[in-house]
Image (cartoon, coloured by chain):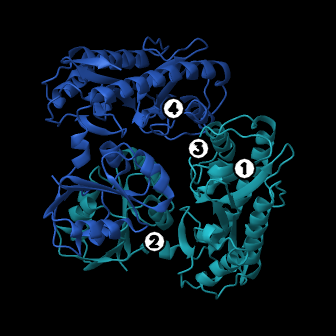
Chain colours: A blue, B cyan
C-alpha cells in the first residue's frame, strides 16, 4: 500500500524520528522523510528506512517525488491533512488519492513487545510521579488554588524538565471535578476536599495516563482506598471503583470493546448513577494520548492481545462533585494487565 | 461575507470566547458558536454576538444550520480545515464554498486600541519575567542542563501557573544556540557561556515574544549591552544589535515589509554575516504567536499603524554559536514603538 503521512506521531511510528514540520511518503519499496533544513542533522542521524529529503516546501517536494514515482494510487487519512496541504499535492498529478480514515492509528492498534515495555515504563513513571505529587500536596498544597496546584503537578510529572507531559494535567477540587475536562480555577484546596488529578507523562514519546480521586486530608495518598465524609460521595466513589475493578478483572481478548464498556457501565447504572457517567470507559494509549481502541458503548472493535487502553469510569454530579479512577491496561495472554 | 471558522483563536476573535472543540458560522446577520456539552455553561456565559448551539457532532450541526440558512456562498480558510471536516460539511449541500487563505489572520492584522493595550501588557509581563529568570539563573542556573533550565524558564514565565506560555521557551547554550528552534539537550550552563533565551507568555490570550542572548557571568542580565570574551562572538553580537536597533529606529508605516526586513539584513550582510542570517526579520504577534504581517525578504505587505510584529535578526554559525535579539513593536503614529 502506498501512503502519505503528515502527523508527527504517525511519521515517528514509521521511521523512528519525527519533528513538527515533516511529510512522509511510502511508495512501493521506497520511503521518503521530507523536512526543512533546521532538521537536516537530526533527521539524517535518526530516520530509519527512509530517504531524508530537505526542502522548505514540503508539499512541493512531495508532489515532485510522487510524479517521479510510478505509483497510481496513494492512501491518506483525511483527518490528518488540511484542505490546503492536500490540494497542493493532489491538484497537479494524475495519481488517485484514496481516503483511509485513521490510517496510522489502525496500524498502531496492536503494540509490539518493545512498545509494551516502553508503555509499561511510562505508566510506572506516571505512578511514581503521583506518589511525589501526594507528598508535595500534603505538605504545601493546602491553601493553594488550582492554577498553582496544576503548575506543581506539571513540574513533578515532568520531573522538573526531564519528561514531556502527555497532556496538561487536570487538578480539580470538589464541584470542579464534575467537569471531565476541567480547566483550573481560583478554587483553593482545603482539608477534607475532594481532589481529582488526571495526569500523564511521555517516556520515549509514549504516553502514560492515570486518574485518582481522593479525600484530601493530611495523610492522603493517590491510592484507591478512600474514605469521604459524605455518604453520597462515598457511594459514588465505591461504585466507580467497583466498575473500574470489574472491567480490569473481566476484560478478555476476543470481546467487543462495547462489552468491556458494559463491564463498567452496568455497575454504575445499577447503582443509580447511570445518567452521571457521561463518557466512554476508555481509549487506546500510545504515541498519542487518544488512539484506538475506543472503549465505548458503540464500538464493535474486537479486543486483542497487545492492545493498550485506559479503564476510566466516572460519575459527575453537576455543581456537586466528580469522581474518576483511571488506569492503563495491556491485553496480555487474553487478560487485562494493569500497567 | 459569510464564513466559517474552525481555529480556536480565529473563533475567539469573533466572539470573545473559544475552546478546543468549536465551530463558528457567520451567515448574513446571524452567527453561531457550535460546541459540545462540556462547554455549555462557559460558552453560554461568555460568547458575544453569536448564538450558542450545543451538539457533540459539530460538523453535522453546522451542515444543518447552513442548509437551513439562505446563503449561497461561504468562505473558509483551507489551511484551517481538515479534508475530513470540510468534506463532511460541503458534500451534502448546494452552497458554494470559496477558499480564502488566512481569512482570520487577514482580519486580525491591524490591532485595535484594546488589543494594543493587552499586547503591551503581555510584553511588559514577558520583560519582567526575563528579569526574574536572570536572577534565578545567576543564583541556581550554573551547572544545570538545558532541560532543567527550560523547565525553570517555563515556571517563571508562567509565574508558577498564573499564565499560559506563548510557546515552549528556547534555552540554548553556545553551539546549541546556532539552531534557531533549538530543543533542550544535556549541555550544562557554565560561567562565561553564551546563553540564548527566547520566550513569551500569554496575557488575556495574547502572546508576548522576546529573545535575549547574553554572556553568562555571575552578574549577567537579559539586557542588550553584552560583552563576550571571543572577538568573533562580540562582532556578531554587535552586528545583530545594530541591525535590531536600526529596524526599530527606521521602520515606518507605509513601508513594504520587505523594506523593514532590509533594515536588519543589509547591516548583517555588510558585516559579512549574511549567509548566517537564515530566517526572516520577524512576524506578527497577537492571539497566535505567528501571524501577519511577516517581515521577510519577499513580503510586499504595506506596514500600517496598528500592526504588531517582532524585530528579531540573528546570526547562526553552525557548531559555534547563535545570536538573536528580539523585541515586539507596535506601529503607532507611523513609527515602531517597542512594547
Give me the chain letter of mark 1.
Answer: B
| Residue at the spot 38% in from the left edge and 68% down from the top edge | B31
> Residue B5, percent across and down?
38, 66
- Mark 2 to mark 1 CA distance (whole Å): 36 Å
* Residue A202 falls in image quadrant: top left
Pointer 2 residue: B104
- In front of the other: label 2 or label 4? 2
Pointer 4 residue: A172
**Whether labels 4 and 3 share one chain:** no
Does A302 appear above or below A37? above
- Secondary structure beneath dot 3 equals loop
Res. A167 mark: none
- In front of the other: label 1 or label 4? 1
* Residue A81 falls in image quadrant: bottom left
> Residue A145, percent across and down?
62, 34
- A90 on left or right of A73: right
Of mark 3 and mark 1, the one earlier in the sequence is 3
Of A232 and A303, nearer the camera is: A303
- Mark 3 to mark 2 CA distance (whole Å): 33 Å
| Residue at the spot 39% in from the left edge and 75% down from the top edge | B101
Figure quadrant of the N terminus of chain B? bottom left
Of mark 2 and mark 1, the one earlier in the sequence is 2
Pointer 3 residue: B184
- Secondary structure beneath dot 1 equals strand
- Secondary structure beneath dot 2 equals helix
Figure quadrant of the C terminus of chain B? bottom right
Specify few, some or many for label 2: CA neighbours under 10 Å numbering under 14, 14-19, or 20 or more.
many
Pointer 1 residue: B195
Give me the chain letter of mark 4.
Answer: A
Does A264 appear above or below B271? above
**Whether labels 1 and 4 share one chain:** no
Amino acid at each position: 500500500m502506498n501512503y502519505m503521512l503528515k502527523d508527527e506521531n504517525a511519521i515517528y511510528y514509521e521511521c523512528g524520528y519525527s519533528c513538527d514540520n515533516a511529510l512522509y511518503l511510502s511508495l512501493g519499496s521506497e520511503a521518503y522523510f521530507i523536512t526543512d533544513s533546521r532538521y537536516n542533522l537530526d533527521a539524517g542521524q535518526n530516520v530509519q528506512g527512509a530517504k531524508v529529503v530537505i526542502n522548505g516546501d514540503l508539499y512541493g517536494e512531495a508532489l515532485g517525488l510522487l510524479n517521479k514515482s510510478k505509483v497510481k494510487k496513494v492512501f491518506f487519512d483525511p483527518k490528518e491533512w488540511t484542505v490546503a496541504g492536500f490540494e497542493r499535492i493532489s491538484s497537479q498529478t494524475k495519481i488517485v488519492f484514496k481516503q483511509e480514515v485513521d490510517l496510522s492509528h489502525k496500524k498502531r492498534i496492536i503494540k509490539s513487545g518493545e512498545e509494551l515495555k516502553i508503555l509499561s515504563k511510562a505508566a510506572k513513571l506516571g505512578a511514581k510521579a503521583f506518589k511525589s505529587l501526594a507528598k508535595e500536596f500534603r505538605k504545601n498544597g493546602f491553601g493553594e488554588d488550582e492554577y498553582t496546584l496544576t503548575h506543581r503537578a506539571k513540574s513533578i510529572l515532568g520531573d522538573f524538565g526531564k519528561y514531556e507531559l502527555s497532556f496538561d494535567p487536570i487538578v480539580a477540587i470538589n464541584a470542579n471535578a464534575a467537569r471531565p475536562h476541567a480547566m483550573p480555577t481560583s478554587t483553593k484546596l482545603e482539608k477534607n476536599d475532594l481532589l481529582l488529578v488526571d495526569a500523564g507523562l511521555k517516556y520515549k514519546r509514549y504516553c502514560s495516563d492515570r486518574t485518582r480521586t481522593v479525600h484530601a486530608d493530611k495523610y492522603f495518598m493517590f491510592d484507591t482506598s478512600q474514605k469521604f465524609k459524605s455518604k453520597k460521595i462515598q457511594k459514588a466513589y465505591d461504585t466507580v471503583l467497583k466498575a473500574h475493578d470489574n472491567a480490569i478483572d473481566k476484560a478478555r481478548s476476543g470481546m467487543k470493546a462495547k462489552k468491556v464498556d458494559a463491564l463498567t457501565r452496568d455497575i454504575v447504572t445499577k447503582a443509580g448513577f447511570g445518567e452521571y457517567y457521561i463518557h466512554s470507559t476508555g481509549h487506546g494509549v500510545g504515541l498519542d494520548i487518544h488512539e484506538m481502541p475506543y472503549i465505548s458503548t458503540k464500538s464493535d472493535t474486537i479486543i486483542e492481545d497487545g492492545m493498550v487502553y485506559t479503564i476510566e469510569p466516572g460519575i459527575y454530579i453537576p455543581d456537586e462533585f466528580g469522581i474518576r479512577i483511571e488506569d492503563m491496561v495491556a491485553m496480555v495472554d487474553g487478560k487485562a494487565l494493569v500497567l
